[in-house]
Image (spheres, rainbow, N blue to C red):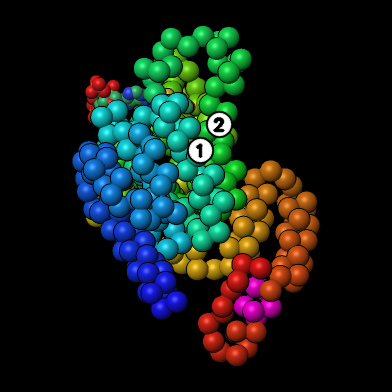
Amino acid sequence: MLARRTAQHAIRLLQKTASTACSKSLQSFPSGAVSNVRQVMAPVVCASARQYCAPAAAYENIITSVENENVGVITLNRPKALNALCDVLMTEMETALINFESDPKIGCIILTGGSGKAFAAGADIKEMVDRTFVDVVSGNFLAHWNKLATCKKPVLAAVNGFALGGGCEIAMMCDIIYASEKAKFGQPEINLGTIPGAGGTQRLVKAVGKSKAMEMCLTGDIISAQEAMQFGLVSKVVPPEALFETALATATKIASQSKLITQICKEAINTSFETTLAEGNHFEKRLFHATFATNDRKEGMTAFAEKRKANFTDS
Ligand code: CAA
């Protein structure tokens, strides 16, 4: 009995250590070196930390990890093409999002391009060049990108360098955008004889207003992180070396709240994009009322009254 307990404890310790080692090591490497590290480490470390790292071993264009036990991190990892969003990469991202969404421990997700030159330089132009109208209509091209926008858990984009075209669009699908001082945003599709196709013409207007959105989409001009902040596209600009830690601090804070209430709150805010003010207020009121059916609402208010930290159970 004692031997079994000791063995179980040893396994738990090994899993914890391996998980931390896996995620910390991957984060601390420059993005170009990460795929090599992943290939070497994955079979060794991830076997012991299956619940955290197993999917990463299967990915070619992204890296996933878990930080602080409840923050899922998706790092785009196609540095040679400035993280251009090829079909395989976006399919992998969809899978990673589904995995994090269904993991009850994960309370917030960070999407980042790592520490390289680009968050993402857009859809893969070379992959698109020979596509025809019939192809893209019959295959409903880019439809699977939408998983990012419909993810139930909060997603925070940490944008390091170029976020152009589809790169800007996936950042806008996220719930919060933090930018490094080196980040650059733009919708340059007009230069390619096309238009934004993953929500750019719609979400950009809501983020920065019609005049700026028109200017960006019709000229293809790129704006700096500071301009993006000024126009409300991003909520924080920080030095490049502080980007991930700043994003992680916020994501950890979000993940420490009730995951149930966080999901309800996200749904309420997103509804404001789809409806009138009166209908939105009505929907919000109903969701607010619904929180009174949860244990976490009772616990949150009781904890306040008892001057202690709330112990949420996501129920
Ligand atoms: N697709 C495919 N490959 C891309 C790419 C993209 N969107 N962006 C960059 N790359 C590749 C380059 O072809 C190059 O590859 P090679 O080394 O094999 O030649 C590599 O990444 C490095 O790029 P650059 O040499 O061009 O790097 P740079 O520093 O000189 O320029 C840049 C950086 C300004 C971002 C430039 O790469 C660029 O303009 N990229 C395209 C940006 C763009 O037009 N994005 C919109 C795409 S369309 C879209 O996204 C549609 C949609 O709405 C979904």
Alpha carbons under labels 2 and 1: distance apart: 7 Å
Residue sitting at x 76%, y 65%: 290
Three-letter amino acid code at the position of disc 2: His
Tell me the residue that label 1 is attached to. Answer: 94
User: 10 Å neighbourhood of mark 1: few (<14), some, or many (≥20)?
Assistant: some
The location of residue 71, given as percent across then percent down, is 44, 58
> Which image quarter is the C terminus in?
bottom right
Task: In this rendered view, identify the residue nearer to me: 41 or 185.
Answer: 41
Q: Amino acid at mark 1?
A: Glu
Eyeballing the image, is 282 above or below 298?
Answer: above
Is 222 on the left or on the right of 140, as rendered?
Answer: left
Q: For numbered disc 2, what is the local secondary structure?
A: helix
Q: Which is the main secondary structure of the residues drawn in magenta? A: helix
Q: Position of residue 66 (x, y in %)?
A: 40, 56
Report the image quarter containing ligand 1.
top left
Tell me which segment is drawn in magenta: 296-301
Question: Based on the displayed image, in which of its 4 quarters is residue 292 positioned?
Answer: bottom right
Determine contact: label 2, label 1, CB under 8 Å. yes
- Tag 1, which secondary structure? helix
Residue shown at the point (50%, 68%) measured from the top left: 256
> Which is more toward the observer, 124 or 16?
16
In screen coordinates, is 21 left or right of 227?
left
Percent position of residue 190, x then y: 44, 21
Q: Of residues 35 and 50, which is closer to you in this image?
A: 50
Residue to which mark 2 is pinned: 144
Reply yes or no: does residue 111 show up in magenta.
no
Q: Residue at x 23, y 39 (%)?
A: 36
